[in-house]
């Protein structure tokens, strides 16, 4: 009988976010596959876990993946952890899960911290519908293609970015998407956590004065006002709001979007929707 692969989310900064279930799982598995064993050993020592580890990271994920699959087929239980957060989200894990499914091996999620979720729910932007775009490529052509593909995306967009690339990324976002609301979340769950809610243009100016520090999650407003020659004159305000709700928006997010598209105040749209 095959073993089980556990995908274990670990703290992104604050060790208090480590769940009892994750501690129990890491303690009972036969092996922990860690993105960086040097980083993970600190976590294990803190919680008194002495399970054997092996490395599993971007540059050995195919070779090591085959080894892990063979152990799972032998009945071993294995936990995967990244440096921080949830495995498979901009970290190794996706390919191993795919191989487990092909080999009829059980995969279990041990949920916990995810930087993208913490960032979007504190951003002040629409959370009814959002998409995760990960890291932009360092290749200029690939970055341009990526951004061109999403410039008309209506959903809130989430990116990860390193401090040394942030200014270039903000410039590219402004060039392709124009000026939009953005929340820059840095050092999430840590002592110096900061959520900066501003616009892309203002963020560019801010970081010209103050160099960015820490790992960032960027939450960017979707294209709620696309110039597509859409005629809303045949829709009542109530119908317009409902059209956004049918796409998955909450009522309040739909009211905000309609107010922006029609050039009305939010309270005017709210009153129209709530009138008896």
Image: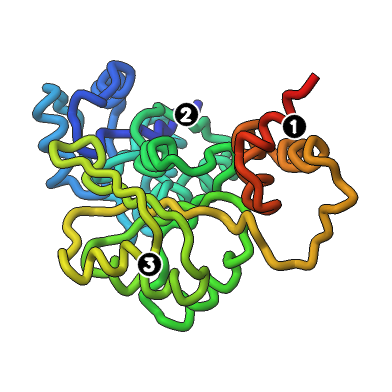
Camera-side residue of 44 and 275: 275
Query: How far apart are the two marked residues, 3 and 1, measured between alpha carbons?
Result: 34 Å
Residue at x 53%, y 38% (from the top left corner): 127
Residue 27 point in image, percent of width and height? 24, 22
Depth check, front residue: 135 or 151: 151
The quadrant of the image that shows the C terminus is top right
Q: Between marks 3 and 2, how big is the CA–CA gap?
A: 42 Å
Q: Is residue 232 left or right of residue 206?
A: right
User: Rounded to the nearest whole Å, what is the CA distance between mark 1 and mark 2?
Assistant: 47 Å
Q: Which mark is residue 56?
A: none
Residue at numbered disc 2: 108
Place residue 253 in its image quadrant.
Answer: top right
Residue, disc 3? 201
Q: What SS does tag 1 mark?
A: helix
Q: Position of residue 83 (x, y in %)?
A: 24, 45
Residue that label 1 marks: 272
Question: Which of pointers 3 and 1 indicates the residue nearer the eye?
Answer: 1
Q: Is residue 256 above or below residue 109?
A: below
């Amino acid at each position: 009988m095959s073993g089980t692969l556990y995908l274990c989310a670990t703290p992104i900064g604050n060790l208090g976010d480590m769940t009892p279930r994750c501690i129990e799982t890491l303690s009972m598995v036969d092996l922990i596959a860690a993105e960086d064993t040097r980083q993970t050993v600190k976590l294990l020592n803190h919680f008194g876990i002495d399970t054997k580890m092996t490395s599993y990271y971007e540059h050995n994920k195919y070779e090591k993946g085959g080894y892990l699959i063979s152990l799972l087929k032998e009945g071993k239980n294995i936990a995967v952890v990244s440096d921080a957060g949830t495995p498979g989200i901009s970290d190794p894990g996706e390919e191993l899960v795919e191989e487990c499914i092909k080999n009829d091996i059980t995969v279990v999620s041990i949920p916990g911290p995810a930087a993208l979720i913490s960032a979007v729910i504190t951003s002040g932007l629409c959370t009814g519908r959002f998409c995760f775009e990960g890291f932009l490529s360092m290749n200029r052509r690939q970055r341009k293609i990526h951004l061109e593909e999403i410039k008309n995306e209506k959903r809130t967009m989430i990116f990860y970015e390193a401090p040394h690339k942030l200014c270039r990324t903000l410039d590219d976002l402004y060039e392709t998407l124009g000026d939009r609301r953005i929340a820059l979340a840095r050092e999430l769950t840590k002592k110096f956590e900061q959520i900066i809610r501003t616009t892309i243009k203002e963020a560019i100016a801010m970081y010209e004065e103050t160099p960015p520090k820490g790992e960032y999650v960027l939450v960017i407003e979707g294209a709620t006002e696309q110039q597509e020659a859409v005629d809303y004159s045949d829709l009542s305000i109530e119908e317009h709001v409902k059209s956004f709700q049918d796409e998955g928006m909450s009522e309040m997010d739909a009211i905000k979007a309609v107010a922006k598209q029609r050039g009305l105040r939010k309270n005017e749209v709210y009153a129209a929707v709530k009138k008896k």
